Image (tube, rainbow, N blue to C red):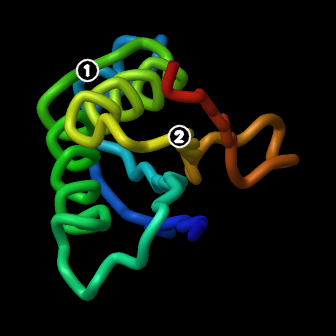
């Protein structure tokens, strides 16, 4: 049995997500990490059909982040995972990390980060 993990790290998008009105109208940076895992009884045989096309993972993330406005960054992660599982039913699990690097609390923080993980049941 072969175990595979595909990761995309630090994808960067400018978008409008947040609780406050100015966050919904003014672009701010977001950073996204995606990790998906799956097993195969045989090797991938050097064909994309037996793997996960990481360009598709990128395009899924980009569309969800840029084409929508959500109040919570948790929702971004949930939507990405949902679409990834719809696209790749053979995946066992997925995890998405979303960072808002401009969020600060009394100049005491440089980033807020949320991690959403799910198994494909």
Tag on residue 69?
1
Residue 87, position in %: x, y? 20, 38
Residue 17 placement: quadrant: top left
**Badge 2 is on which residue?**
92
Q: Residue at x 35, y 24 (%)?
A: 82
> Eyeballing the image, is 45 above or below 61?
below
Q: Residue at x 87, y 47 (%)?
A: 108
Residue 112, position in %: x, y? 68, 41
Q: Earlier in the sequence, mark 2 or mark 1?
A: 1
Q: Residue at x 46, y 61 (%)?
A: 40
Q: What crowding class fits label 2: few (fewer than 14 Cα within 10 Å), some (14-19), or many (20 or more)? A: some
Of circles 2 and 1, which is in front? 2
Of all residues, the one furthest to the right in this rendering is 108
Tag 1's secondary structure?
loop
Q: What crowding class fits label 1: few (fewer than 14 Cα within 10 Å), some (14-19), or many (20 or more)? A: some
Residue 35, position in %: x, y? 53, 55
Q: Is residue 23 visible?
A: no
Tag 2's secondary structure?
loop
> Eyeballing the image, is 115 above or below 54?
above
Residue 18 placement: quadrant: top left
Tell me the quarter of the image containing the N terminus.
bottom right
Distance (Cα) linking label 2 and label 1: 28 Å
Q: Report the front residue among 98 and 112.
A: 98
Image-based side of 74 in relation to 110, left or right? left
Q: Is residue 1 visible?
A: yes
Q: Residue at x 16, y 54 (%)?
A: 59
Tag on residue 101?
none
Image-based side of 59 in relation to 11, left or right? left
């Amino acid at each position: 049995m072969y175990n595979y993990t595909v990761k995309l790290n630090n994808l960067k998008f400018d978008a409008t997500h947040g609780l406050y009105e100015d966050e919904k109208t003014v672009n701010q940076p977001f950073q996204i990490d995606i990790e998906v895992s799956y097993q195969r009884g045989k090797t991938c045989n050097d064909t994309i059909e037996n793997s996960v096309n990481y360009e598709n993972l990128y395009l899924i993330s980009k569309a969800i982040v840029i084409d929508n406005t959500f109040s919570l960054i948790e929702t971004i992660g949930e939507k990405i995972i949902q679409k990834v599982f719809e696209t790749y039913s053979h995946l066992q699990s997925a995890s998405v990390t979303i960072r808002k690097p401009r969020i600060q609390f009394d100049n005491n923080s440089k980033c807020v980060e949320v991690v959403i993980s799910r198994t494909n049941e």
